[in-house]
Image (spheres, rainbow, N blue to C red):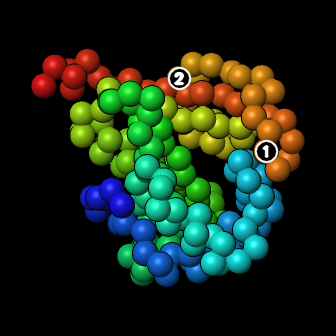
Amino acid sequence: MTRVATLSTARFTMRPLRRADAGALFPTFSDERQCRFLTRAAFASEEELWGWLAEPGWPGRTWIAEDVGGAVAGRFVAVPGHEDGVVEIGYVTCKDRQGDGVARECTAALVDHLLAEGNRKLTAEVDAENIASIRLLETLGFTREALFRQHETTHIGLRDVAVYGLLAPASSLSK
């Protein structure tokens, strides 16, 4: 498993994944409405979810956002892209915390961290109908770079996928 640095925001600690997190994330990942824009259907059990979260061959890194009271608020990921310096991000906010600014605050911290690591570009793939996620990406400075029509078949059918990108500031690349 790839090392995951602990990140801090004003309201959250973003830490590595733990086994107990499957239980905290299960109410969100077992809800069909919450999983609408995932590439797979909702999970049937905590064990199934844990197997997916902790998949040994998965090359990405996972951060769990935890509030000051210790409650899990979301999952944030970074996956190596097609070449060095390009990283794909992803995020899911727990359903009881949606609308609370968790995704904005924690994704911004993740973006800052990944750019500080020296990555030159961050990307995100999003279902073209996922307006909340598109709004978040655009708020954080991501630009839509592509729209792939009828690109991916998921549990809800054939989907259009938008690809968003954020380039590192030129000043950070010269360091």
Picture residue at 76% right of the left edge, 73% below the top? 44
User: In the image as oriented, which residue stretches furthest toward the front?
Assistant: 57
Quarter of the figure with residue 97? bottom right
Q: Nearer the viewer, residue 92 or 1?
A: 1
Residue at horizontal 58 percent and vertical 59 percent from the top: 93
Q: Nearer the viewer, residue 173 or 2?
A: 2
Residue 10 appears in the figure: no
Q: Please say if 30 is above or below 23.
A: above
Q: Amino acid at mark 1?
A: Thr
Q: Position of residue 77 (x, y in %)?
A: 47, 51
In percent of width and height, residue 142 lies at 49, 28
Quadrant for the C terminus in the image: top left
Residue marked by disc 2:
143
Where is residue 145 shown, x and y percent of the image? Answer: 57, 19
* Residue at figure coordinates x 65%, y 37% from the top left: 126
- Label count reads 2
- Which numbered marker is on residue 46? none
- Residue 168 position, x and y percent, is 32, 26
- In this picture, residue 144 sits left or right of residue 110: right
| Residue at (42, 80) in percent of width and height | 70
Quarter location, residue 64: bottom left
The residue at which mark 1 appears reads as 154
SS type, badge 1: strand
Q: Residues within 10 Å of mark 2 (few under 14, many from 20)?
A: some
